[in-house]
Amino acid sequence: MKKLLILFIALAFVASCAKGSGTTGSYVAKIDGTTISQEEAQAEMSALPDMAKQFFQGPEGTSKFVDELVKKEMLYLEAKKRGLDKNKDYQRKLEEFKKITLINTLLEKEIEAGSKVTDKDIKDYYDSHKDDFTINTQVKISQIVVKTEDEVKKVHDRLKAGEDFGKVASDMSIDKVSAKSGGNLGTFKKGDLSPELEEAVFRLKKGEVSMPIKLKDGMHILKVTDAKGSVVDFEKIKGLIAQRMTAEKQRESFDKFINTLKKGYKIDINKDAVSKLAATQPQAPVAAPQQAPAPVKK
């Protein structure tokens, strides 16, 4: 447990507290010629995640924290004494860490500043996407039932090509009763369907088609042709919308920034070298032919 705690603290620190014997200010510990100042210890403590800070509350916790700083510094000094900082693998990892840190600094400056969303942005998004935040309480569904995975693929291929769901149901569904009405099963409320069907159906929006659901009589492909429900209150969903909008803006800003950079750099891709590199990589597994297609809208 102690070793895990030391590792946890070591990973949590971004910068080493080793500043050399010339460090000014009141010190909390000295290890040979290295001093850990009170200011440095405070900075390290402030940088900890909230969960980690709970381990070091109060005078006893602070003493434990300083003890962890000393252990970390001893390990660092011992590694240098053994010349591990000259190790090629270490140097490579260090350069990669420096590169990633510098990239993150750049992106924080260029991307995050342009990815902020206001309360008005969030409310406008909510008002224009209320269908996305509606919880269905009643659905009207149609179905296509087939026997094999190959038939499932044929159904989805026809739907993706733009064919009417009802027409495909009439042609391919082995449930002849519903097939006569284009697959129509009627309207259902929660609790009316089997758990397998209800879980899938009530997640769908109006017009969406489900993944195939395997039941005893075959593979069921369902479409919600109409839906009624209630919209989640804005205050309950506000935080989620903010996260979604921020992520979208960050992607847009990143793509725009990258495209701008490409105009200022000469990039030469050696396709022959790329082909040779690809040949040395393990082959990706081939998707099983029975893999279910993604849901489609029609």
Image (cartoon, rainbow, N blue to C red):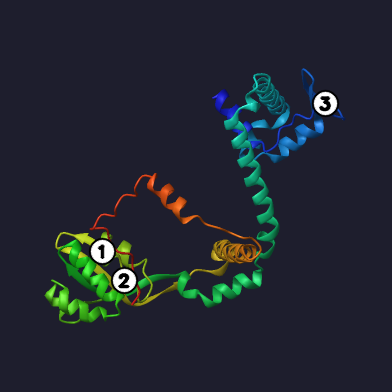
Is 77 placed above or below 131 here?
Answer: above
Q: How many marks?
A: 3
Which corner quadrant of the image does residue 297 belong to?
A: bottom left
- Local crowd at mark 2 within 10 Å, few (<14), some, or many (≥20)? many
Q: Which mark is residue 27?
A: 3
Residue that mark 2 sits on: 209
Left or right of 3? Residue 36 is right
- Local crowd at mark 3 within 10 Å, few (<14), some, or many (≥20)? some
Is 226 placed above or below 79 here?
Answer: below
Residue nearest the viewer, comparing 80 with 278: 278
Which corner quadrant of the image does residue 76 belong to?
A: top right
Q: Is residue 30 visible?
A: yes
Is 57 placed above or below 71 here?
Answer: below
The amino acid type found where label 3 is placed reads: Tyr
Left or right of 94? Residue 232 is left
Residue that mark 1 sits on: 212
**Disc 3 from disc 1: Cα separation:** 66 Å
The amino acid type found where label 2 is placed reads: Val
The amino acid type found where label 1 is placed reads: Pro
Q: Can you say which quadrant of the picture contains the C terminus?
A: bottom left
Query: Residue 57 location in percent, x, y?
Result: 69, 32
Residue at image point 51% right, 74% down: 129
Query: Residue 40 location in percent, x, y?
Result: 78, 33
Which corner quadrant of the image does residue 75 belong to?
A: top right
**Disc 2 from disc 3: Cα separation:** 66 Å
Query: Residue 221 location in percent, x, y?
Result: 25, 68
